[in-house]
Amino acid sequence: MSTETAEVAVEPTVADAVERARAAAGWWAGLGWDGRRRALLAWKRTLAARIDELADRIRAETGKPHGDAVLEVMLAVEHLDWAARNARRVLRRRKVPSGLLAANHAASVGYEPLGVIGVIGPWNYPVYTPLGSISYALAAGNAVVFKPSEHTPGVGRWLAAAWAEAVPQEHGPAVFQAVTGGGEVGAALCRAGVDKLAFTGSAATGRKVMAACAGTLTPVVVEAGGKDALIVAADADLDAAARAAAFGGFGNAGQTCAGVERVYVERPAYEPFLAKLGELARETRPGEEPDARYGRMTTPTQAAIVAAHIDDAIAKGGRAVVGGPGSVRPPFVDPVVLAEVPEDSLAVTEETFGPTVVVNPVRDLDEAVERANASRYGLAASVFTGSRRTAADLAGRLRAGAVSVNAVLGFAAVPALPFGGVGDSGFGRIHGADGLREFSRPKSVTRQRFTAPIDLLRLDRSPAALQRAAKLFRLRHAR
């Protein structure tokens, strides 16, 4: 399959795509666990075999280095593989305890497909992020209509064409389709009658998506960005912490929802950490070369947002340790390290989505947690410390959907872990067993095995039966 072939396919309208998906959803669900597993693994093999081709497409549309694009596909394929292989185990019908009052019943719960899932994907990770919804929705037995970002339409078409090639049966291509365009296409998908919609993007757009879906009571999963914090304890490995902060803050040009935008360092380690991070920042430069440390800002407007945050931080009393306003040279932004930035500045409160990191000292770890949790976002966080007890304590106190200890983004490569945020970072979960259930409908079934010795579920129950039941109830619950 060539890149050109992926681009010339006639795009169906949103309504047509959802109608086709609706017709194919029954066929897809009817394949059963084994049939869907085979199809998903065939798609996986296609993505893995053509990883360089897909990476080139990602690079062309996002500007990220080839190696970063390859890593993105690798992560996405790991999740696809996990979803395909674990859907039966997670979603199949299972027995549950009946309890005392229903001891004469057998009880079970199973998970059924919702039908058609709409997915609106972002441009910063145009394969890894949307496949976190697409893979799990397909594995759960749903058909999917995918609207990629208007900045990465070719990636979306490539994925759909690869699916059609891997699953060539009569209804196969309709099970996963891509519809491309701008916000109007996303709005149409929200109104198209899908059974659930998964959205990744800004909090502001997430609110619009929810409003559009409210008219049809379409449930949504929202991942709406973050302002993630890294906490560095005085006993941390500062070299490792600085490398992690540089990767989380500057990698992908800082365009990572769960990257590092804020760093809180205990005072004794503050100056040494700042010096180490500064050194790494000074030796890092973006570029168009395939082996550059990171690439350009993907969208034309993002550099202006980064510049505004840098200017505001400095105007409010922060200092630029590395870089500054001159680091913004569209479409590139050089690494920027800001220090002692007031907590009410844009660089601390708003998602910057650029290669800038704010580093502030704190008197102790309690203050670090307090500042980290003060954000209205809560997607992910990181902790660096030499104490396992301290790490566990901090991880438990941080208001975030995921926490990495002595690493950043550690959860991204673990398919069994659910991913999602709190607050303005959204709600719902993708990945892992929770991600499979997110795109399923639980169904409870009871079966009466024998007549209850004390039968209360009848209109003509006797007063004596109710008295005996109440006595047993008090013995069980009132002591």
Image: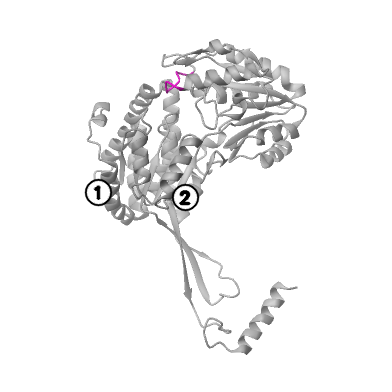
Q: Which residue was labeled with disc 2?
A: 438
In this orientation, which residue lies closer to the viewer: 90 or 312?
A: 312
The kind of residue tagged 1 is His
Q: Is residue 58 magenta?
A: no
Magenta extent: 294-301
Q: Tell me if 149 is positioned left or right of 360 in this view.
A: left
Asked whether residue 300 is drawn in magenta, I would say yes
Is disc 1 surrounded by few (<14), some (14 to 19) or many (20+) residues within 10 Å? some
The image shows residue 161 at horizontal and vertical percentages of: 28, 36
Which of the labelled discs sits on residue 340, or is there none? none
Name the quarter where the C terminus is drawn: bottom right
Depth order, front residue of 256/215: 215
Is residue 192 depicted above or below 279 in this figure? below
Q: Is residue 20 left or right of residue 332?
A: left
Which circle marks residue 171 in the picture?
1
Sequence-wise, the earlier of marks 2 and 1 is 1
- Whether residue 292 is visible to the viewer of this picture, yes or no, is no
Residue 182's x, y, as percent? 35, 33
Q: Is residue 283 above or below residue 192?
A: above
Figure quadrant of residue 135: top left
Q: Residue at x 44, y 50 (%)?
A: 219
